[in-house]
Image (tube, rainbow, N blue to C red):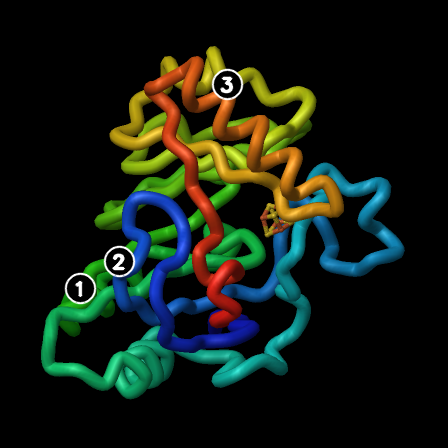
């Protein structure tokens, strides 16, 4: 059984697939933070803005692969080829080949947004890795590398040697958000291999 916080259909707001309709499946739990405020200061990842605790969100619950694809299909609600994004929390704590296979069998293209600390040993159509300062990266290849910017210990010059098709910096959403955006733009101007990713869904106020 997979523990799922929420499942909903929206437009991808970040990175190279921006603007694309997708069903988002948010897995419960992360290996870099408990999700509880009292643990934030001592967690590896301390800037997270996502609620990934429990199964109480929209369409959340505990699902088998068969039940989960039925929900994904109902929410996709289109005869066109489907697109499902597995996110979290950290999806690789739960995502497996069985779920990916059943998605493919049901004509869904699959994507993952992962912190890259758990190896992926099965094929996913679109792999987006977002490394976190202080964690050990284990996924060195994929479609999109998306770095929340700035993060003190992250060495962007080292990361750009990895094998990805797109390299993004995404300004950290914090009280110094505007400054982060200006610095990220300056960084991209000096380092054109990197592109700016904005959280368009937040700018537009959509989930
Ligand atoms: S790795 Fe991602 S989901 Fe986990 S705490 Fe950090 S930002 Fe949140």
Q: Tell me: residue 59, above or below residue 7.
A: below
Q: Which residue is mark 1?
A: 104
**Sequence-earlier tag: 3 or 2:** 2
Q: Nearer the viewer, residue 194 or 67?
A: 194
The answer to whether 153 appears left or right of 146 in the picture is: right
Q: Tell me: residue 191, above or below residue 202.
A: above
**Sequence-earlier tag: 3 or 1:** 1
Whole-number angstrom distance, CA of label 3 to CA of label 2:
27 Å
Query: SS class of the residue under badge 3?
Result: helix
Q: For the residues labelled 3 and 1, say whether their Cβ atoms are less than 8 Å apart.
A: no
Q: Residues within 10 Å of mark 1 (few under 14, many from 20)?
A: some
Q: For the residues labelled 3 and 2, say whether their Cβ atoms are less than 8 Å apart.
A: no
**Sequence-earlier tag: 1 or 2:** 1
Q: Which residue is mark 3?
A: 156
Q: Quadrant of residue 97?
A: bottom left
Whole-number angstrom distance, CA of label 3 to CA of label 1:
34 Å
- State the residue at coordinates (72%, 37%): 44
Whole-number angstrom distance, CA of label 1 to CA of label 2:
8 Å
Q: Nearer the viewer, residue 14 or 133?
A: 14
Q: Which percent across, then down, holds residue 85?
A: 35, 60
Residue 200 visible to the viewer: yes
The answer to whether 58 appears left or right of 24 in the picture is: right
Q: Nearer the viewer, residue 133 or 180?
A: 180
Q: Nearer the viewer, residue 37 or 15?
A: 15
Please identify, in this view, whether the residue under mark 3 or under mark 2 is nearer the observer.
3
| Picture disc at residue 129 | none
Q: Which percent across, then down, holds residue 65?
A: 35, 74
| Picture disc at residue 110 | 2
């Amino acid at each position: 059984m997979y523990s799922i916080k929420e499942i909903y259909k929206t437009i991808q707001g970040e990175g190279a697939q921006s603007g694309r309709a997708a069903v988002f499946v948010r897995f419960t739990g992360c290996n870099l933070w408990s999700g509880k405020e009292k643990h934030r200061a001592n967690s590896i990842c301390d800037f997270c803005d996502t609620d990934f605790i429990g199964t109480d969100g929209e369409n959340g619950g505990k699902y088998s692969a068969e039940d989960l694809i039925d929900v994904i299909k109902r929410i996709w609600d289109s005869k066109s080829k489907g697109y499902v994004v597995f996110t979290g929390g950290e999806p690789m704590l739960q995502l497996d080949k069985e779920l990916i296979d059943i998605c493919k069998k049901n004509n869904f293209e699959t994507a993952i947004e992962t912190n890259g600390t758990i190896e992926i040993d099965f094929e996913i159509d679109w792999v987006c890795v977002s490394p976190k300062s202080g964690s050990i990266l284990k996924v060195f290849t994929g479609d999109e590398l998306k770095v929340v910017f700035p993060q003190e210990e992250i060495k962007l010059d080292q990361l750009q040697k990895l094998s990805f098709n797109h390299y993004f910096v995404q300004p950290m959403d914090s009280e110094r958000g505007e400054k982060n955006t200006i610095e990220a733009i300056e960084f991209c101007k000096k380092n054109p291999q990197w592109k700016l990713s904005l959280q368009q869904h937040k700018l537009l106020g959509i989930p």
